[in-house]
Image (tube, rainbow, N blue to C red):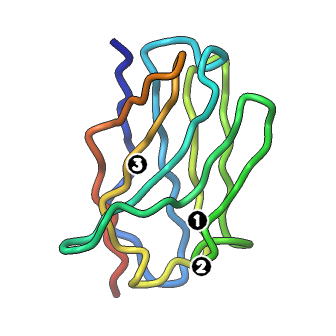
Amino acid sequence: QVQLVESGGGWVQPGGSLRLSCTLSQRMSDASVIAWYRAIPKKQREFVASLSSRGTSDFADSVNQRSTISRDAAKNTAYLEIDSVKPEDTAVYYCYARFHEADYWGQGIQVTVSS
């Protein structure tokens, strides 16, 4: 069983930056995809960003050009950074990983963007 633990959430002022971490219990190099999703009340969980094992990244239009997804294999940790945050970035953010055709999710972490 793979465990994913998110950290770094909390309160962020509009225009600031948020940086989330996701630490995996297994070697990150064994994951075919690492991704971030987010959910707000009464809405479906939505895709934010992904990073493949080949290093290819993809971003949702809502965060494109102001976001970075990265990984540190030595720490088995993935990161999401969103700059110029807006109130609509407020959500519970979930880390996702795919290992050997199986999907794994973190428990989620709250991020609130407010002045």
> Residue 64's x, y, as percent?
68, 71
Numbered tag placed on residue 17 in the rendering: none
> Residue 10's x, y, as percent?
31, 60
**Image quadrant assignment for residue 102:** top left
| Camera-side residue of 42 and 92 | 42
> Residue 14's x, y, as percent?
46, 84
Q: Work out whether 28 lies above or below 113.
A: above
- Give left or right: position of 77 versus 14: right
**Amino acid type, label 1:** Ile
Question: Badge 1 is on which residue?
Answer: 82
| Camera-side residue of 34 and 12 | 34
Q: CA distance from mark 3 to mark 1?
A: 12 Å
What secondary structure is found at the residue carrying circle 1?
strand
Q: Earlier in the sequence, mark 3 or mark 1?
A: 3
Neighbour tally class for label 2: few under 14, some 14-19, many 20 plus, Cα within 10 Å: some
**Amino acid type, label 3:** Gly
At a point 28% along the width and 58% down the height, the residue shown is 110
Q: Are marks 2 and 1 in contact (CB under 8 Å)?
A: yes
> Residue 44's x, y, as percent?
31, 66
Q: Are marks 3 and 1 in contact (CB under 8 Å)?
A: no
Specify the farthest residue to the left: 42
Question: Badge 3 is on which residue?
Answer: 8
Q: Earlier in the sequence, mark 2 or mark 3?
A: 3
| Camera-side residue of 32 and 84 | 32
**Amino acid type, label 2:** Ser
**Image quadrant assignment for residue 91:** bottom left
Numbered tag placed on residue 84 in the rendering: 2
What secondary structure is found at the residue carrying circle 3?
loop
Q: CA distance from mark 2 to mark 1?
A: 7 Å
At a point 33% along the width and 12% down the height, the residue shown is 1
